[in-house]
Image (cartoon, helix red, strand yellow):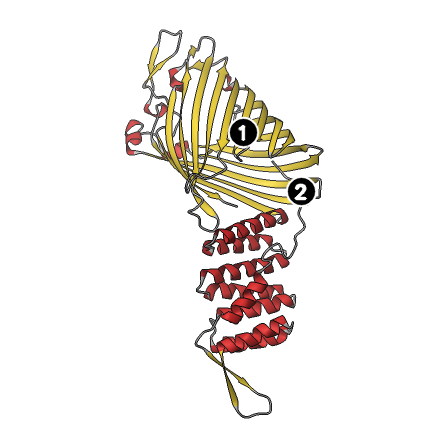
Amino acid sequence: MVSPVTTRFAPDLILGAVRKGLLALICALALPLAAQAESPGSSDDIQLSAEEVRHLAAGALRAGDNATAIRIARGLLKADPEDPIAYFILSMAHAALGETTLSRKAARYAFQYADDPGDRVRAGQLAAKSAVAEERYSLAQLWLRRSAIHAVSDAEKAAIAQDYQALRRLNPWSMRLNLALRPSSNVNNGSEDALQIIDGVPVTGILSGSAQALSGLIATADLSLRYRFQANQTSATYAGLRLYTKHIALSSSAKAKAPGLRNSDLSQQFLETSVDHARKLRGGILGGTLATGQSWYGNNPTYRFVRASARRVWELGTGSWIGVSGTVEDRNSVTGQRYDATAQSLTVFTGLEMGNGDQLTMTLGLRDTDAWFINDRSQAASLRAAYAFDQPMGPVKMDVALTLGYADYPDYRSGFIVVPGGRQDRSVYADVNLMFDDWDYAGFSPSLRIRAGRTSSNDSRFKTREFSVGLGIESKF
């Protein structure tokens, strides 16, 4: 769901206590380093310790004498070019003077040379604050993620996550990358049987190895980029780019069963560009999307498509909602007419927040496809119920889902055989998703997806069974 609400950035929202905390740090930290300060009008040298010089710099910062603080910091760096506290002083003084680029660069060196994780968190946050002042929001988000690597306490992690969400509302650019790697018992959606039996037809065929279920490894990458080029209190408009790719690595047993099949024969990709607009209405959101793109299978282009959709969402309060969307997609084969088709779909979805914070979502989908190739003509329906637990179970956050599906291909032919009454498939799949929030790096946590299911059909070629365990990476922010 697209939120059209914009947020005005308040300078104290990110790192409201950073200046106070850094001043305390500067005053408290002492190193066995000596600096020299020459008194005007005197030939004698006054020996000051690094701690005493830092106290002078902190006092200059508190008094607003940023130029003096900068001179003192540069003197400290002459004695020790890797002094993180001197870089902290420089960063804060330049920030106070409005010299945000210099402030960010000094904070970068403070981050680089700091040894204590807490110091690195503060330096990263200071760099993020300077990047925000430069309106370089993506760079600020990167610095917050670098800070998250060194955050130790739950309070620090929560503050970084909150700041990141604030930046997400400010940043016109957004990126989402989903990576997954999963071994599967059926990477090609092949039949579980070697024989092809069609109900009502007294003929039995033998399926080729490539038509049977093959085991192997599935790797997917799904990259989405969006740019918000219009936004106000009631609406927002986005331009989007999405690239999806799937690659297969067949197991040794699969290669023995289907020796003529290559990994690349099962690869899939699609590229999509889109424009999306959402408007906040009383009690909900009205939105629409126009998209176009191209699909590839086995490294060969298959079809180009244009898709238009509209959606309406009603907010029910207490974190619950109900919505409906409709989509029309027109496909045109890159060569010939094999993939020419028009598909129409209707989706009804709802999300209900339970009293304990858990969330139940349900989605009903209906789809009608009119295609040039008669085996692609179909009507389908699916029902998906998902339940997300609000509280983690030990180190794991969990959600589960069950999907039921039905598809009817009224004109289906298997070779020269007309399937009596057409082909009908029924499917059931269960998913368990586990996210390990406690094991994170830069705000990313590993996830584990376990999937099991099967499809039954009156044409045994489409009786399938699958079990897979997938490892992925998800953002906590």
- Can residue 437 be spotted in the picture? yes
Instruction: Using the rendered view, name the quadrant where residue 234 is placed.
Output: top right
14 lies left or right of 399: right
41 lies left or right of 147: right
431 lies left or right of 380: left
Callout 1 crowding tier (Cα within 10 Å): few <14, some 14–19, many ≥20? some
Q: Is residue 179 above or below residue 38?
A: above
- Can residue 134 be spotted in the picture? no
Q: Residue furthest front?
A: 355
Disc 1 marks which amino acid?
Thr
> 125 and 102: which one is in front?
125
Q: Is residue 229 above or below residue 318?
A: below
Position of the N terminus, as image quadrant, is top right
Mark sitting on residue 361: 1
Callout 2 crowding tier (Cα within 10 Å): few <14, some 14–19, many ≥20? some
Residue at image point 55% right, 21% down: 367
Mark closer to the chain start, 2 or 1: 2
Q: Is residue 429 above or below residue 87?
A: above
Residue at image point 53% right, 91% down: 44
Mark sitting on residue 415: none
Q: CA distance from mark 2 to mark 1?
A: 23 Å
Identify residue for label 2: 5
Q: Secondary structure at mark 2?
A: loop
Mark 2 or 1: the one toward you: 1
Q: Is residue 466 above or below residue 374?
A: below
Disc 2 marks which amino acid?
Val
Q: Secondary structure at mark 1?
A: strand
Residue 462 rendering spot, x and y as whole percentages: 40, 19
> 278 and 157: which one is in front?
157
> 220 and 411: which one is in front?
220
Instruction: Using the rendered view, name the quadrant where residue 22 is placed.
Output: bottom right
Residue 145 rendering spot, x and y as whole percentages: 50, 53
